[in-house]
Image: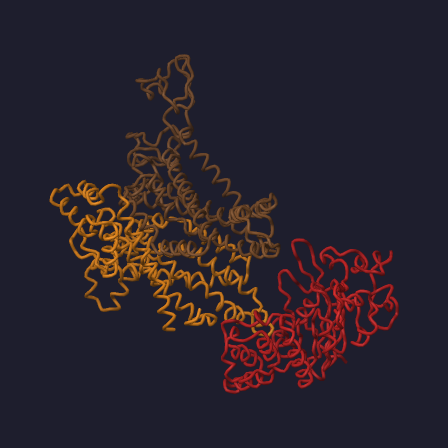
Chain colours: A brown, B orange, C red
Amino acid sequence: MERGSLNPSSQKYSALIWRQFKKSRLAVICLVFVAILAAVAVAAPFIANDRPVLMRYNGSWSMPVLKMPVALRGVDLYELMSNPPAGTWMLMPPIKYSPGSYDLSSVLAAPSLQHPFGTDGDGRDVAAQLVWGSRVSLSVGVVAVGIAVAIGVLLGLIAGFYGGWIDIAVSRFIEVMICFPTFFLILAVLAFVGPSIYNIMIVIGVTGWTGVARLVRGECLKLRRREFVMAAAASGARDRRVMLRHILPNSMAPVLVSASFGIAGAILVEASLSFLGFGVPPSQPSWGSMLSQAQQFMDIAWWLTLIPGSAIFFTITAYNLVGEALRDAIDPNLRT
Amino acid sequence: MFTYIAKRLLLMIPTILGIAVITFAVVHLAPGDPASLKAQSASEALSSDRMTREIVEGTRALYGLDKPLHVQFAVWLKRIVTLDFGTSYRDHRPVIDKIGDALPITLTLNILTILIIYIVSIPVGAYTALKPKGFVDRASAILFMALYSLPSFWVAMMLIALLCSGDYLNWFPIVGFVSDGASILPWYGWVSNVAWHLVIPIACLTYGGFAFLSRFTRASMLEVIRQDYIRTARAKGLPEWRVAVRHGLRNALIPLLTLMGTLLPALLGGSVIIEQIFSIPGMGRLGFESVLARDYPVIMAIATISAALTLVSILITDIMYAVVDPRITFGKR
Amino acid sequence: MPLLSVEHLTTHLFTDSGVVRAVDGVSFSLDRGEALGIVGESGCGKSMTALSLMRLVPEPPGRIVGGRVLFQLTATGGPVDLLMLSNEQMRKVRGKRLAMIFQEPMTSLNPVFTIGDQIAEAIKLHEGGSRRQVQSRVVDMLSLVGIPTPAQRANDYPHQLSGGMRQRVMIAMALSCRPEILLADEPTTALDVTIQAQILDLLRRLQAEFGMSLVLVTHDLGVVAEVAQRVIVMYAGKIVEQGTVDQIFRQPLHPYTQGLLKAIPPLAKLPPGTRFATIPGTVPDLAHLPRGCAFADRCPKVRENCRENEVPDDPCNVGRLVRCFYASNP
């Protein structure tokens, strides 16, 4: 039975995919990992910070993580922490360092209880940088793919829907885009517009939409053909609204697969750009730039290379495996 | 055959135009007057009035920026067709000469990479299709997926530390395409010297490709062995391996051919970072250095030539496709 | 001594929704030079029976789970159970002693090899010989099945031939090693009506010429009447009626056979508005067969005990297999 014959917008279809997806335990683990990672990225200031999450000072409560209370302005927080006056109470985040806080007394410290992932050449806590770096990786991944999906769906729909010369033009455009070595194109564009996290997101998105566009276009054509036969049989006019209502949900699942792989790819591109020194500014910690800085200490500080590299690896693996499991779940050939 | 190729060549013209439009658009991406803006950013890097002025004028002349847009485009198109990309800002060598030096190195790297990916992936993919859900299928899926997810620059860093730096082992050279002075070696010595230099870079470029290609082969093969003609071959009494290889794999490989052309841009992009890490003087490194130095003529030339190269490789695979698949007849399509 | 005797052949398909009893204890025999028709609606297990004889059941999900297929492989020795042969031994039987042609001539030939190559492959495999000898056998076979200018046609690719021509090529390939039995699975279903008659004619002629036995699997009773001497009617994996062509067409005793015969559109002109007779209902889900007779739900003669008891081969003692408690003339 063809996938399209099941009404894809129905509850049953998504339930079917979900049931199929759940069969792979590894994929479910990866999905959980992705969710945790997203939570870490969102909650980074509460996880790794040199300010207390919650504190009571001079009889009033405050959350210095979000906003330094007026009462504390000009107070040496470090002094306060090591020597708290009576009536002061504070709850520190699990990692008591912010990614930018230098601790020159412990430069290149190996992993220990105090610094679970060690410190880098400037005495910055690796764990804190890792937590904050996840923000860059994930936001670039998600936003870039969001842009790519938006462009791809739009162009794919237009091409598949109107056909004719519009389709030819869009298809040619796709053909031209895939001729360029994407990574170099991204570098080249960034050379002109200057690297910033927003530019990186936009450039990755603008160069990465071709797969989605082809997918949606194909789905569109397939459906139009079928709808055409149906319409001819019922001798009714083709209703574009009905078609759209069918096309979008129908291509949702494959687009989601593509997006999952796309996020993995975008994270890798961002890390590569940062590694080459073409990523986000150094004030923002990112996994790629951590690796870039780790290069000079490879022989003495293994953790500097191993930890951010593993973070990139596991994140990319998780997204890829989720994508693969999803692809298998929607493949009607595997379903018997 | 001839008419087929001619037709395909004609069909390439709009694509080349498209490539020209995109590269042209990239030049004009910077807001305001591109020439002065570029000069501004360049002046930060070079901090020399004379050179700034030179760049402004050079950029103006190169892109004809003082002329109306359509004239500019015509000028740019003419440059592409005549392969005249001006001279590099950095060393004033003609851009096309610099690319002429770098291109063979990158092509060597990438063609070897594609070959190795195919040689490893096709047998694995075919085998896993014949024994789906078996040990090899599961193991290779996980292994290749893990390899696919390993950032190549990270692996390169670690391999250098482990195998090249001398801290642990000193099996391979860290940098370069060939040793200095290797030109005095006899040809086989030169080749083995190059090979010795390329082992680690090529390893870094290849491992990520296994996942995609082996899965693609597997899917293609699974599709083929469901076909009726496979049943016919079995009904003839052919041995199973002969059914699999002669009737199965032969058909399954046809769609793999088309991929060869599209693999190239991904690899060219990927070799930017690997060539940079290993200091291999190919297109990727040239491109990256030009990006760092804002050497626009070189950047534009590399983007254009890489795209054109991909176009050519797609054309070649299309022709191969037609040769391999008798259902495609030349001339009439 | 029959050339082939099939005893309680049972083939199951193990699917997610349960075990499908595609072939459920089928027994029949086939004499040398005889033509046997197996008829039934699609999904009744007739094609699966033929594939089981070849041991080409797609696996997974299918597997032959029981029975014997006794083939008189040598003139003097006893019959050999094909199901007990090693894969290697079975391979040598396939194409050489027992050949098969399929329903879809369009997709049954490999698109990337010439038809000459594909026929030569079977000859080389089973009989060997020099290139030249094999090549001339190929041309002989092609001309035998009525392909004009066979020497040139041998270099054609399948897509260059029409459907009828391709089915002729399939026949040439199957007969190239002079098998004793040819299994033809819906050989004419995918073809135009005019071509159908030609192919049936060819099959009949070649059967006589080669002195081989033919098992013709089809849903088309007209095809069976034209070619076969004996007929097996299958329903839901079981044989429901067996007899000579005369018996089946003139004296059908099973209600299902009677229904099938009624469903053949008569050749006479029909007044407008006439409805074709059809068998009401649909084939039951083979994974969840009811107790008793599988045809009960669609049967006009159904009574209480049909739904309760397994029906034996010939409960009414009519002298041939009619699997019905109430076998009678219509």
Query: Residue C315, position in %: x, y?
Result: 87, 66
- Quadrant of the rendered image containing residue A90: top left
Q: Nearer the viewer, residue C330 or A19?
A: C330
Q: In the figure, is residue B208 to the left or right of C151?
A: left
Judge whether A30 appears above or below C16 on screen: above
Query: Residue B39, position in %: x, y?
Result: 18, 43
- Quadrant of the rendered image containing residue B85: bottom left
Q: Residue at x 18, y 49 (%)?
A: B60
Q: In the figure, is residue B263 to the left or right of C148?
A: left
Judge whether B123 appears above or below A312 on screen: below
Q: Nearer the viewer, residue B51 or C29?
A: B51
Give the quadrant of the N terminus of chain A. Answer: bottom right
Q: In the figure, is residue A100 to the left or right of C148?
A: left
Residue A325 visible here: no
Q: Nearer the viewer, residue A18 or A157?
A: A157
Judge whether B266 appears above or below C130 on screen: above
- Quadrant of the rendered image containing residue B81: bottom left
Give the quadrant of the C terminus of chain A. Answer: bottom right
Residue B72 visible here: yes
Query: Residue C209, position in %: x, y?
Result: 67, 86
